Amino acid sequence: MNSRWMQMMVVVGCVAFALAILFPAAGLARQWGKLDVCMVNVHLLGRAWTAYQDDFDSWLVGLSTYSGTPYRWVEYPLYQPVYGSPAVTQGECNLTYQLNGVRAGKLFAYTENEQIYHCPNDRYWVTRSYAPWISYSGSGCMNGEDYTSRNGMIISGFRSVTLPSGESKKIVCVNKFGQIQNPAARFTFVEEDWVSRNQWRMAGSFITMNSSNYWSWWDWPAGYHEGRSTLGFADGHVETHVWRDERTLTLIRNGSATSYIVQEGNQDIVYVNNGYVPAGW
């Protein structure tokens, strides 16, 4: 009897040990599977971004939701899926209206799928009222909001920033593909945490270097993949970037009540800033 009992306990122990290994592995596999979906999403958004400029003589789609940006890739939540129609208020916002804004955007004719605008690891829509369906943001310098004056598609008036070398450079917002230097290094789309900024309707673009301070975050990336974020680039490739500075990870995890966050010497800021300037320094 004791021998059988011992044998049974050994079997139970082996099963428990196997489950202890398999359950975390299954969870990790699910996480990596969702990351793969996210990368495909950004890849498809990048293909739509490229197809748009191919159809419009290399003019870039507007990567901002603000009305001052023409030919916007997506719209605010709308009562009807009609480009330029009035946006809903926060209290009225629901998933239907969110998807209307997606369908009204200029890229939807190329994507034809609302799902690719949403990272499967972005659970804010489930856990927070009025959270945006859209998990991605367009670069503020890719025909986005980072300019001071615009006349139609003609953009002028750019911020200046002092580089770590001490040299002053302008942050140029481009609106044609040919203005992009080194497209493989300049991002178009990035996962952004809209909720931590209380931007329930997904406002504007992704912008960095607040107040022209090179070492400051303005917006910051989302951490939907355990300290990683998905970024799409102007040449069409997609990367999963690992954030390495603990200050970046803390900001991603906890958010901030202010958008002016200075972190001197942060290598993640260097990476983002270099990818942010399509016309180069």
Image (tube, rainbow, N blue to C red):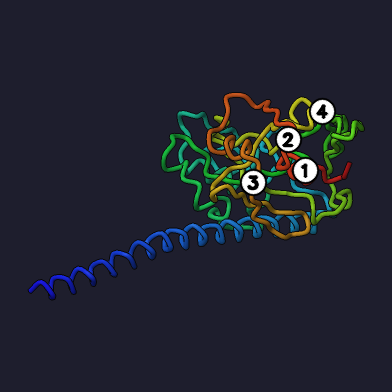
Mark with earlier residue (4, 3): 4
Under mark 3, the amino acid is Trp
Under mark 4, the amino acid is Thr
The residue carrying pointer 3 sits among few (fewer than 14), some (14 to 19) or many (20 or more) residues within 10 Å by Cα, namely many
Residue topped by disc 2? 208
Distance CA(mark 1)–CA(mark 2): 8 Å
Residue topped by disc 1? 276
Q: Quadrant of the N terminus?
A: bottom left
The residue carrying pointer 1 sits among few (fewer than 14), some (14 to 19) or many (20 or more) residues within 10 Å by Cα, namely many
Distance CA(mark 4)–CA(mark 3): 31 Å
Q: Nearer the viewer, mark 1 or mark 3?
A: 3
Q: Residue at x 64, y 42 (%)?
A: 83
Residue 237 lies in quadrant:
bottom right
Mark with earlier residue (1, 2): 2
Q: Quadrant of the C terminus?
A: top right
Mark with earlier residue (1, 4): 4
The circle on residue 148 is: 4
Q: Are marks 1 and 2 in contact (CB under 8 Å)?
A: yes
Q: Is residue 149 left or right of residue 50?
A: right
